[in-house]
Image (cartoon, rainbow, N blue to C red):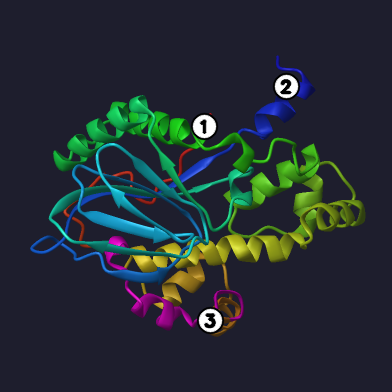
Amino acid sequence: MPSRENASCWDRVPEIKMIVCRTQTLGPGGSFHWMQKNARGPYWRIYWNDAPGAFVSCEGRDVELGPEMIVALSPDACYSTRADKLVNHFYIHCFVSYPFTEIKGRMFVLTDQDLLRRASALAKKANQNHDTWQTQMELLVYLNSAFLALPRKSVPDCPKYSPKVMKAVKILGRKQKISNDELARLVSMSRNAFLFLFRKETKNSPQAYSRQLRLNEACVMLQHSDKSIDEIARETSFCDRYHFSRAFHRVIGHTPRQFRLRKYPDIDTAADHIFKWTACSTESR
């Protein structure tokens, strides 16, 4: 049996929640021209191209993608893209839990040779629609390796949350909606003591924290599915479309309809090739 200390250590292992993994042909004559300006999103984007000719601009840098690098854009990174030549574009969108939630608005260029080999191999399998459990495990190895390759100084070392708050945060990430009483019971605390500790460490109430997670999920569905706004409101546990739209506009700055109509090309649902694990949830342990 693992000790209590070991159990709390495992509670801190970051979880990866997949949104989409695809290949597309970018550039003149391809699926998309990939012309985006000041785009952003609440999740990570991992890019690899099989040839030069497409560019990502972020943090005042203009980077030409190619087979010798992987570009990782963190949540809330403001970026622009363009494709001047025809290239095959392999990309992944995913959520990653703490400590990677603390990295905001950044672009990283990774050149590890093992990572590049993995990206190339996965891109070929995506082109062949080669979706097996082995390929899915290879994808998780690739993503874990990519996040481990980020500069150490960019990733917080010290735990931000106590074990009980960390456990509550993980529960909130797995459940669409849960009461404060139930959360307190699951972390073995009284309701008032739990609410005080959670707010002290996260600067938010559990319900506000949950609402932000549900709005992140709504962003994904608005961009990656053809579900109606009413359906998305129900699936993200808002009582109706009115309350969902009001909360969405207050936090995101656009109505759900406005957000969907922006239609960034790299998140269009008409991809050339797509693995079946799109929008599935996976854990890195």
Residue 75 % position (x, y)? 52, 57
Circles 2 and 1: CB atoms closer than 8 Å: no
Left or right placement of residue 111 versus residue 273 in this view: right
Rounded to the nearest whole Å, what is the CA distance between mark 3 and mark 1? 37 Å
Left or right placement of residue 108 versus residue 90 in this view: right
Rounded to the nearest whole Å, what is the CA distance between mark 3 and mark 2? 42 Å
Residue 6 got which mark? 2
Q: Residue at 55%, 80% (x, y): give it.
A: 253
Q: Which residues are magenta?
A: 250-268
Residue type marked 3: Ser
Tell me the residue that label 1 is attached to. 148
Of callouts 3 and 1, the N-terminal one: 1
Residue 260 falls within the magenta-colored stretch: yes
Residue 121 % position (x, y)? 23, 31
Q: Nearer the viewer, mark 3 or mark 1?
A: 1
Tell me the residue that label 3 is attached to. 245
Q: Residue at 32%, 63% (x, y): give it.
A: 81
